[in-house]
Image (cartoon, helix red, strand yellow):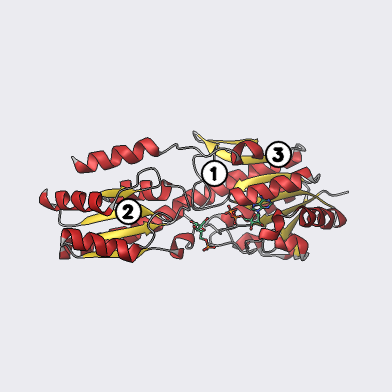
Amino acid sequence: MTKKIAILTSGGDSPGMNSAISFLVKSALSLGFEPYLIFDGYSGIISKKIMPATKFPYNGIASFGGTAIGSTRFPEFKNEEIQLLAAKNLKELGISSLIVIGGDGTYNGGYKMHLQGINVIALPGTIDNDIEFTDYTIGFDTALNTIIETVDKLRDTANSHRRCFVVEVMGRYCQDLALYSAMATGSEILITHTNILTPEQVSQMVLEQFKKGKPSVIITVTENILPNLKEFVARIEELTKITTKGLEIGHPQRGGRPSAFDRILAAKMAMKAIELINQGKSGLAIGILDGKIQARDITEVVSIQSKKTNELVIKLNTINQN
Ligand code: ADP
Ligand code: F6P
């Protein structure tokens, strides 16, 4: 009997998820599996929104952003009864394996399905780059480029008008989008969860930058730090007497055509996931470390909150002030 594999995307979407779906389907078919698509994340298992992947145009989606099979936040999935029902629904359809693409919440859901006897492999699909044991998550690179493009445009007008801008970027509680976009754009001041600065400290730093002859200052902030961006901006303007504006880039960071890096990363991870399913493996999360695609236990991946980029945050702010 042909073995059936189902695929779902869950949590916040990310550019490159479609490339992962496309390569999962193609790799599964090439190894003689019967691939299925589950729509709208974990809720689709409960509502049985599941269809054979061969009835879906999986070949034409890889170059598009978002996820063609939909994604939801379905908090009910934390409930054990719902998990039991999900496993029952999958087993009734003869689906023995499940590939989940998403962030750490999605990984938790996948682990619960693993405990229910489904073979589960997880792929890191999130712009936040907040998953352990992987240097990059699928979507991070595209989101980073979106931020860079936006900040470069801001810089042009900021220079012309000698202004200061506060740019708030996504990342949930991870500082990677803020840190790496600040490095790439030459943003003068960086505020992250590991480097909180008061309006007074920031204003002092802004004034020093202008004193050094800089025509503009860009302050990059990770989301979920400032209680109110508008009030923060007004306070900086009040303290520095320099025209200051704020920009929350928001959801465009989650969209757009995936970069070459994200498409290729997703494809490599997808091929590895199917290889592992073919070997009868379960409860594993795929990552890329030092350029090598590898797998770790999901439990190991979701239980750690590293501070891998802290040193760089401090270094960058110090360098900018000198
Ligand atoms: P992300 O996967 O991007 O971290 P969320 O944290 O919103 O996004 O999680 C996505 C979905 O994963 C949730 O809406 C829920 O369906 C499922 N999920 C999250 N945490 C758990 C958990 N502890 N147990 C089971 N399912 C979970
Ligand atoms: O996890 C991806 C992400 O875009 C975070 O950066 C952000 O905090 C969150 O999702 C926003 O979620 P929503 O689109 O549900 O508001």
Decide: few, some or many residues near mark 1? Use Cα within 10 Å; few <14, some 14-19, many ≥20: many
Type of the residue with mark 3: Leu
Depth check: give the residue in front, 259 or 187. 187
User: x and y percent of residue 104 in the render?
Assistant: 59, 48
Q: Are marks 3 and 2 in contact (CB under 8 Å)?
A: no
Say which amino acid is labelled 2. Thr
Foreground: disc 3 or disc 2 = 2
Q: Image quadrant of residue 304?
A: top right
Q: Is residue 107 above or below residue 39?
A: above
Q: Secondary structure at mark 2?
A: strand
Left or right: 168 with respect to 275?
left
Q: Quadrant of the C terminus?
A: top left
Between disc 3 and disc 1, the foreground one is 1
Spatial separation of the CA atoms under disc 3 and disc 1: 20 Å
- Measured from the top left, where is residue 196 in percent x and y? 34, 47
Q: Residues within 10 Å of mark 2 (few under 14, many from 20)?
A: many
